[in-house]
Amino acid sequence: MTDPRIPDDSMPLSQPGGDARQAEHTVKEVLRWYQARLAKAGDLGLTREAIDELQDARDQAADDLDLLEEADEDTTVQIAVSYAAKLKELTGT
């Protein structure tokens, strides 16, 4: 079952350009990471506080994905850079 807060990759942003598409892809990857972690929260023995932090971070990423739909170029680049760093941190790559 997919989370309705994580849009399908086929949903284009209204703003054309590589930065927007890359930002969208990266934010969605971060959303997927949070959702997978939350789905395994019980198995991982996460505390309520850790679960709340993951949910807050996931919700912020969903909000930032929505923001990308109408973001100017500078905001798009900021989101792309921020989420690329976040994804690297989360995945250890």
Image: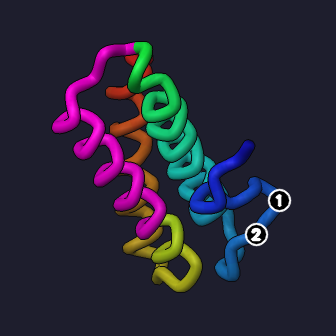
Q: Among all residues in the image, which is located at the extreme right?
A: 10
Near-viewer residue (41 or 28): 41
Q: Examine the rendered structure and indicate whether residue 54 appears above or below residue 40.
A: below
Rendered-image quadrant of the C terminus:
top left
Displayed quadrant of residue 90: top left
Identified by mark 2, the residue type is: Pro
Determine which of the numbered discs, if any, sits on residue 12 in the image: 2
Asked whether the beta carbons under mark 1 and mark 2 sit within 8 Å of each other, the answer is yes
Identified by mark 1, the residue type is: Ser
Q: Examine the rendered structure and indicate whether residue 16 appears above or below residue 10.
A: below
Q: Marks 1 and 2, Cα distance to the nearest angstrom?
A: 6 Å
Residue at left offset 31%, top offset 16%: 45
Determine which of the numbered discs, if any, sits on residue 10 in the image: 1
Near-viewer residue (16 or 93): 93
Determine which of the numbered discs, if any, sits on residue 58 in the image: none
Main SS, magenta residues: helix
Element on which disc 2 rests? loop
Residue at left offset 48%, top offset 81%: 71
What span is colored magenta in the figure?
44-64
Give neighbour class at mark 1: few <14, some 14-19, many 20+ (Cα, 10 Å).
few
Coloration mode: rainbow
Residue at left offset 51%, top offset 39%: 35
State the image coordinates of residue 69 (x, y, percent, origin top left). Answer: 58, 78
In the rendered structure, does residue 48 fall within the stretch colored magenta? yes
State the image coordinates of residue 75 (x, y, percent, origin top left). Answer: 39, 73
State the image coordinates of residue 82 (x, y, percent, origin top left). Answer: 34, 50
In the rendered structure, does residue 59 fall within the stretch colored magenta? yes
